[in-house]
Image: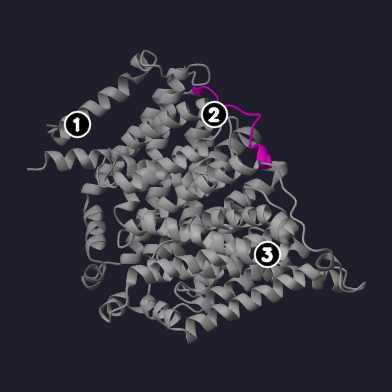
């Protein structure tokens, strides 16, 4: 029924993403919503990249938020330049991930999950408590993204929502291409070997902890990139971007779409963002709604949407 | 200065005892069922609010006795209907499920009792200071420490001396063998979950007496409990107890010298412990 081969599926996905600003308004969305979907999908795909190999990180919001604050603080206080802000944001997230990764990469399973959650909280409390610089609970405002000067001309991403969308999509495409290439590389194959049988991989002489550390840092690069884009989208960095609720959102996006499928997190992010946008405009009790949604997905949708299609189409 | 340090050390130990109480419940469930119960804080809030409802009818002591039991019953029902389905699957799913459950419980309490802080009064003789010099030693705090101590001793007696307790400990080590020996593992896990939630409910009543009641009371306390478990070592209940006391003490002492790092310090401590001993202070190698 839904028998699409992989390449055709990818072509459809890219066609939809490239033309999104053209049809999104017609179906009741708006360009900013599209940007949000793509940004959160990038974060969820980065998480999914890790999920396939070393385990569940429930703390990716920390690096997402570090990216957001890194970009915001740089643009607000240091250099009013969007690209520099993004660079600093990613660097901040990756630096933190590299250091904490030394501890985290040695752990597995439940221990891994719990430790990633707990470490994520440090940055939340720093952002929350360091009022003078980060704006505390109110978040970091009073700055905005700036037009990008490419030398041959400037791209006005501040006023042109569509221009910003295409910047986001460009970053997304680069990140996705790198992740896909990594999955096919010897490095990716080694990670799969580790996932399937860690002790055998160890006996074969693969430095398991180092590989897991590397995949952790790679995943965090893309999550921080998503974080910088998210801050630029809102012209705002929110301490709740750093909190464990946000990490949970990433995980549910990955699960909802289908964890073992490459495009799953994108589908999950689209559903989640649209639903959240709709529900929070309709009711005050969005928390209950999201909570019940999580529970239902876990009980009935464990394979995710794309996983279901695949099962049906399997011979 | 001495008094200030003493005050904060004492305060830290109280908070630590409190974290430990909550973390022990989490640890029980985690050890036997492999479920990281994110909703533990939600159950804590439920316990506090139930006590708040019961106080007009049965007074503080009645509420203290009954509310945790009611909370445990709610927990047992939820385990039986929902959480049981997730056993044996990737811990990811139970984590996500209880994550959603935590949202529902928090929002549910907010829906029923409102977002504002509700006062929760304890008997007068409990809230007066015990001595003029050590003004911070209110009766309630001493009472809390005693009660937590009592609860912890009772828990360890149950686990070491009763048949159910020994089965729980055996199941933690090797559930399959316990099952093969004729123990009904489903009932065992169910009871164990109830026991864990009972501790959360008890912590909820105590927290309500100290902080007042807010829907977010549970979600603010869940993370330190995680840290207590990680520092103590997964799988070890004495470790969890030790971890709780340590992080309480650490945050108490930090309050004296660098107040704005009070929350962050426990995560730094966790990082240090994990860097030296990846399995936690009292955790056994090779489990989890």
Query: Which quadrant is the N terminus of chain B positioned in?
Result: bottom right
Residue A39: image location, x then y, percent: 42, 34
**Residue labelled with disc 2:** A234
Q: State the SS at label 1.
A: helix
Question: Which portion, as a residue range, is magenta?
Answer: A135-148
**Residue labelled with disc 1:** A9
Q: Was residue A21 drawn as part of the magenta stretch in this picture?
A: no
Residue A163: image location, x then y, percent: 43, 19
Residue A287 marker: none
Residue A201: image location, x then y, percent: 23, 67
- How far is mark 2 from mark 3, CA to CA? 51 Å
Residue A152 visible in the shown view: no
Closer to the camera in the image, B215 or B194: B194
- How far is mark 2 from mark 1, CA to CA? 31 Å
- How far is mark 1 from mark 3, CA to CA? 63 Å
Mark whose residue sits in front, 1 or 3: 3
**Residue labelled with disc 3:** B62
């Amino acid at each position: 029924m839904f028998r699409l081969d992989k390449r055709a599926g990818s072509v459809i996905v890219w066609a939809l993403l490239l033309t999104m600003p053209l049809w999104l308004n017609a179906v009741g969305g708006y360009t900013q919503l599209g940007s949000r979907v793509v940004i959160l999908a990038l974060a969820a795909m980065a998480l999914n990249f890790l999920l396939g190999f070393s385990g569940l990180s429930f703390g990716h919001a920390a690096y997402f938020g570090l990216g957001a604050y890194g970009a915001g603080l740089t643009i607000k206080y240091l250099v009013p330049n969007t690209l520099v802000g993004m660079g600093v944001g990613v660097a901040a997230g990756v630096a933190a991930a590299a250091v904490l990764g030394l501890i985290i990469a040695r752990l597995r399973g439940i221990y891994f999950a719990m430790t990633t959650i707990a470490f994520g909280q440090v940055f939340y409390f720093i952002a929350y408590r360091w009022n003078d610089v980060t704006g505390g609970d109110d978040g970091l405002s009073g700055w905005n993204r700036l037009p990008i000067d490419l030398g041959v001309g400037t791209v006005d991403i501040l006023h042109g929502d569509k221009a910003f969308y295409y910047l986001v999509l460009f970053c997304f495409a680069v990140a996705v291409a790198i992740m896909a290439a990594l999955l096919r590389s010897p490095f990716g194959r080694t990670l799969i070997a580790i996932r399937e049988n860690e002790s055998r991989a160890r006996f074969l002489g693969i430095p398991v902890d180092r590989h897991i550390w590397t995949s952790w840092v790679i995943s965090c690069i893309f999550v921080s990139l998503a974080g910088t884009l998210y801050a630029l989208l809102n012209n705002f960095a929110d301490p709740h971007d750093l909190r464990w609720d946000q990490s949970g959102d990433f995980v549910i996006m990955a699960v909802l779409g289908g964890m073992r499928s490459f495009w799953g997190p994108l589908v999950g992010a689209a559903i989640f963002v649209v639903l959240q946008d709709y529900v929070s405009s309709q009711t005050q009790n969005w928390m209950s709604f999201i909570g019940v949604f999580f529970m239902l997905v876990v009980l009935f949708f464990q394979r995710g949407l794309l996983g279901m299609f695949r099962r049906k189409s399997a011979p | 200065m001495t008094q200030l340090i003493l005050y904060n050390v004492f305060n830290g130990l109280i908070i630590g005892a409190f974290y430990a109480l909550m973390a022990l419940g989490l640890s029980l469930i985690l050890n036997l069922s492999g479920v990281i119960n994110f909703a533990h804080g939600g159950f804590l809030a439920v316990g506090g609010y139930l006590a708040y409802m019961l106080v007009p009818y049965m007074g503080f002591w009645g509420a203290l006795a009954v509310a945790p039991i009611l909370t445990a019953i709610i927990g047992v029902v939820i385990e039986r209907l929902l959480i049981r389905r997730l056993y044996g699957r990737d811990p990811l799913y139970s984590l996500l499920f209880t994550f959603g459950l935590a949202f529902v419980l928090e929002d549910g309490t907010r829906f029923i009792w409102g977002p504002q802080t509700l006062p929760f009064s304890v008997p007068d003789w409990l809230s007066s200071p015990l001595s003029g010099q050590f003004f911070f030693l209110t009766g309630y705090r001493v009472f809390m420490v005693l009660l937590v101590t009592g609860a912890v001793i009772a828990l360890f007696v149950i686990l070491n001396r009763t048949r159910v307790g020994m089965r729980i400990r055996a199941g933690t080590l090797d559930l399959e063998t316990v099952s093969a020996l004729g123990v009904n593992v489903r009932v065992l896990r169910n009871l164990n979950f109830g026991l864990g939630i009972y501790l959360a409910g008890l912590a909820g009543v105590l927290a309500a007496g100290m902080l007042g009641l807010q829907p977010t009371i549970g979600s603010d306390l869940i993370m330190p409990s995680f840290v207590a478990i990680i520092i103590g070592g997964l799988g070890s209940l004495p470790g969890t107890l030790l971890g709780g006391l340590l992080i309480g003490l650490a945050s108490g002492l930090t309050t004296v010298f660098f107040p704005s790092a009070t929350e962050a310090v426990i995560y730094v401590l966790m990082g240090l412990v994990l860097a030296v001993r990846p399995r936690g202070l009292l955790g056994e190698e090779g489990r989890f």
